[in-house]
Image: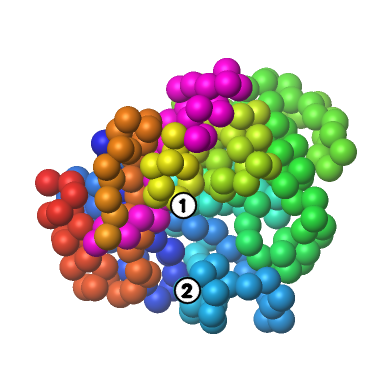
């Protein structure tokens, strides 16, 4: 079992250049960083978990800038988006950013993706929230072409471009693994059709077994699972190995350097060392 961390990178929390080496020193295998381009001031979408939206959602540093800094200050840490929101992003720029991160890190990029919970955020990017899943699926297919073909071309309902050159190509072949977040029927279809790994925020072994059985029926029996954002104080991992979970990522509150380091020490002592 590998162990990683999920942590919002903001202008008020631990600096990426400090965080990366701290994770490696404590034996963690990966870092997953969530993404929000912005939070609309007038919100209709309920906050994840209910209640008021926590402050850190408003203050995120760009995810690829964050991971590039972490890449420059580490040698082996996996560099994950957890999750990026490609439906809201330019598809060509995003393909180049993912490939560039993979190149400069020596093949450590982990591309976690999802549709996102904030419908107004998607709307501000010109994406109909009702169609953001279909937009995401097309963008994943289009990026795969950019990463793997010298001359890439794509013509879909939501994404279209004429033949183009786009380098660098990723170090990992055929491209950095795509970790699909979510457990809805649409998310699982996305995992089957476009994903290389599942990134669910469920910790119920029955869910893992159910999805594993379904993937086997779909001809994808070996998709790895990463448990996303677990509470290190309450998690019971019994049955994870049997269900095919190969990585657990632990939620760490996005606070100041001293408090984050203290928390990492406690998690590493219990789980990693």
Q: Which residue is at 76% across, 43% downward? A: 134
Percent across and percent down for residue 23 are: 25, 52
Q: Which residue is mark 2?
A: 56
Q: Nearer the viewer, mark 2 or mark 1?
A: 1
x, y (%) of residue 255? 34, 74
Q: SS at mark 2? A: helix
Query: Which residue occupies 61% across, 38% down?
Result: 188
* Distance Cα–Cα, label 2 vs label 1: 19 Å
Q: Position of residue 48 (x, y in %)?
A: 55, 68
Check disc 1: other Cα within 10 Å, few if <14, some if 14-19, many if 20+.
some
First in residue order: circle 2 vs circle 1: 2
The residue segment tinted magenta is 210-233
User: On the rendered structure, is 8 left or right of 36?
Assistant: left
Residue 244 in view here: yes
Judge from the rendering whether residue 254 lies leftward or rightward of residue 176; answer left or right.
left
Residue occupied by mark 1: 201
Query: Residue 228: horizontal and vertical position, in percent?
Result: 42, 50
């Amino acid at each position: 079992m590998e162990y990683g961390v999920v942590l919002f990178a903001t202008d008020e929390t631990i600096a990426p250049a400090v965080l990366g080496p701290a994770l490696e020193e404590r034996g963690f295998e990966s870092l997953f960083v969530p993404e929000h381009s912005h939070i609309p001031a007038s919100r209709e979408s309920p906050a994840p978990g209910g209640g008021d939206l926590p402050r850190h959602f408003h203050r995120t540093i760009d995810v690829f800038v964050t991971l590039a800094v972490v890449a420059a200050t580490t040698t082996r840490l996996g560099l994950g988006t957890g999750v990026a929101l490609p439906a809201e992003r330019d598809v060509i720029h995003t393909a180049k950013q993912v490939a560039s991160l993979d190149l400069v890190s020596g093949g450590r990029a982990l591309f976690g993706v999802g549709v996102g919970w904030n419908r107004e955020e998607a709307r501000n990017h010109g994406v109909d929230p009702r169609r953001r899943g279909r937009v995401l699926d097309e963008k994943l297919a289009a990026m795969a072409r950019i990463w793997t073909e010298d001359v890439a071309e794509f013509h879909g309902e939501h994404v279209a471009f004429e033949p183009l050159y786009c380098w660098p190509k990723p170090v990992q072949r055929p491209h950095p693994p795509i970790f699909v977040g979510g457990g809805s029927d649409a998310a699982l279809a996305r995992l089957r059709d476009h994903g290389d790994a599942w990134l669910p925020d469920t910790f119920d072994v029955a869910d893992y077994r159910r999805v594993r059985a379904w993937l086997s029926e779909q001809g994808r029996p070996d998709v790895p699972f990463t448990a996303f954002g677990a509470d290190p104080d309450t998690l019971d991992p019994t049955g994870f190995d049997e269900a095919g979970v190969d990585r657990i990522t632990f939620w760490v509150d996005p606070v100041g350097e001293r408090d984050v380091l203290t928390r990492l020490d406690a998690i590493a002592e219990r789980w990693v060392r």
